[in-house]
Amino acid sequence: MSEQRRILNKQTMGIADGLPLQASEGGIEELRQDIQRLMDMEAIKQLKHRYFRCVDTFNMEEMKTVLHKDVKIRFKGGNYEWNLDDRDQYIANMSYAFTKKSIGQHNGFHPEIQMLSDHEATGIWYLHDNMWIMNHKLKTHGTALYWDRYVKENGQWFIAETAYERLYELNDPITDTLNLSTHYLGTHGADPQ
Amino acid sequence: MSEQRRILNKQTMGIADGLPLQASEGGIEELRQDIQRLMDMEAIKQLKHRYFRCVDTFNMEEMKTVLHKDVKIRFKGGNYEWNLDDRDQYIANMSYAFTKKSIGQHNGFHPEIQMLSDHEATGIWYLHDNMWIMNHKLKTHGTALYWDRYVKENGQWFIAETAYERLYELNDPITDTLNLSTHYLGTHGADPQ
Amino acid sequence: MSEQRRILNKQTMGIADGLPLQASEGGIEELRQDIQRLMDMEAIKQLKHRYFRCVDTFNMEEMKTVLHKDVKIRFKGGNYEWNLDDRDQYIANMSYAFTKKSIGQHNGFHPEIQMLSDHEATGIWYLHDNMWIMNHKLKTHGTALYWDRYVKENGQWFIAETAYERLYELNDPITDTLNLSTHYLGTHGADPQ
């Protein structure tokens, strides 16, 4: 490889400092806002956790409650790129990747959530994934940094923008039959094309 | 495999919506309850984190402070099943699995904690595990979804029910000697039977 | 191996119980302190999350805002040991390990944060790491328990002490060329010596 990769830090990801993790000096109304801010941070983490659960169980019904309908997606892998501008496109793409012949493992760690206001926030996450595409005899695995924007509409948080770039990606041929003793997507994945 | 797997979502796991992540509109007593709820969510996450630490260090002494004495366990792997109804049974089972010839890695991600009241809560987690049983020349690894029920008694949170089903499980033979440079359970695991 | 490993539990790691996760029975000033405590726990988790992001992107500029300048480091691997007593030593060591020929993956799970006061805290974490040193044809991977001490100075939290010991460590030769499709440190790692 002779690739040149751009630097990945808060500046290049467009992540600015959010509201400080500092309790207000005000009265009961200000403390109520502080409590709400902590609850919103918890809600945003659970939103992203639901995202990963829905990905690997190919639960596109619940996924509709996670992604904003105008979600903007920019995923840049080593061998692929997803540039999508709405939820329906995302769900269509997922049905090509998460078939009965796939095994998906997508885990997100290390949340750095920044509250910008009572209805807007950003987050950085660290992805580790293993993806076996058995009908193409390929295992792709690696890590990436995610940077997201979240919005609250009608009392619910949604992922409005989500982007990642890889730290590394390995693409290994699958040479033997996998010793699978159980496989959820084998029943519940999409039918392969 | 020609297995048929049941669907795994909040409904089939029996996970209902908990108390909303919405600050009370009331006065100081209501805000105190909101703060306590946030503290309880943190305490429950730490409870499960202690669980995983105690598993992989085979620390059954501290484990007794994590599991309710009447804990109900339903773990459904590809090649095994644990159906246990108290803590002592669990600890007995652990001493068969976590021996000086085992290496255990059990990590739980993506907590979705729902508070049902000030003394009851549920949680969904995403497990990734690697388990080498060196004396049987077998490595089992995979992922699973956990769904748990937690109770608070005398000011302490306990795991009262815990269940999981796999997303995938692979069972690979160990063909070579492992290049182990250090191995905690080699000293502190149970004696193999 | 005929190693003997010392036991790893809260006592041997020197982790004492922190302030209880129990809302104060007092008035508005006491609740403000409770809220600040929850915010501090969030800030400490984000601090450690930034640490792992900075490690694997070899971002030593931002790392300077994470580690206390007198940070005390005690990392005990299977084949290596880091005993360092300041941040500059740490950064010098990192530039030997995180070169253009390395791939680093360091993930920290299961935080158990204990607040000792409004400016001091401890934390236990569970590390999983994969480290490929391609120019030495070696992949080191395993898990460890971390125990840390954090201090708040001028409104900012820093890692003041950090130690780990392994649960297991495997050292595997790299026998084939890695099927890398992208590699961030290949551009942004240090130059190998």
Image (spheres, coloured by chain):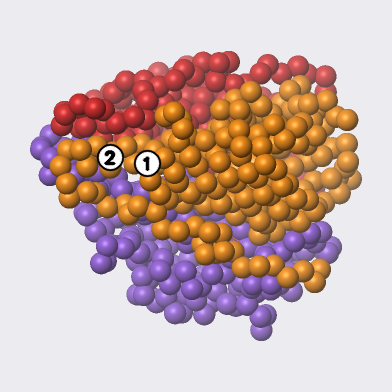
Chain colours: A orange, B red, C purple
Judged left or right of residue B184, residue A87 is: right
Which residue type carries mark 1?
Asp
Disc 2 + disc 1, Cβ < 8 Å: yes
Same chain for the residues at labels 2 and 1, yes or no? yes
Image quadrant where residue A55 sits: top right
Image quadrant where residue B171 sits: top right
Q: Is residue C152 visible?
A: yes
Judged left or right of residue B176, residue A126 is: left
Q: Chain of mark 2?
A: A
Residue that appears at 52% across and 46% down: A149
Residue C131 tag number: none
Q: Check disc 2 and report the residue beneath it.
A: A33
Secondary structure of the residue carrying tag 1 is loop
Q: Name the spot of residue A50 as percent of width and height, x first.
A: 55, 32
Image quadrant where residue B35 sits: top left
Q: Earlier in the sequence, mark 2 or mark 1?
A: 2
Residue A118 tag number: 1
Looking at the image, is C119 positioned above or below residue C73? above
Q: Name the spot of residue B117 as percent of width and height, x first.
A: 32, 20
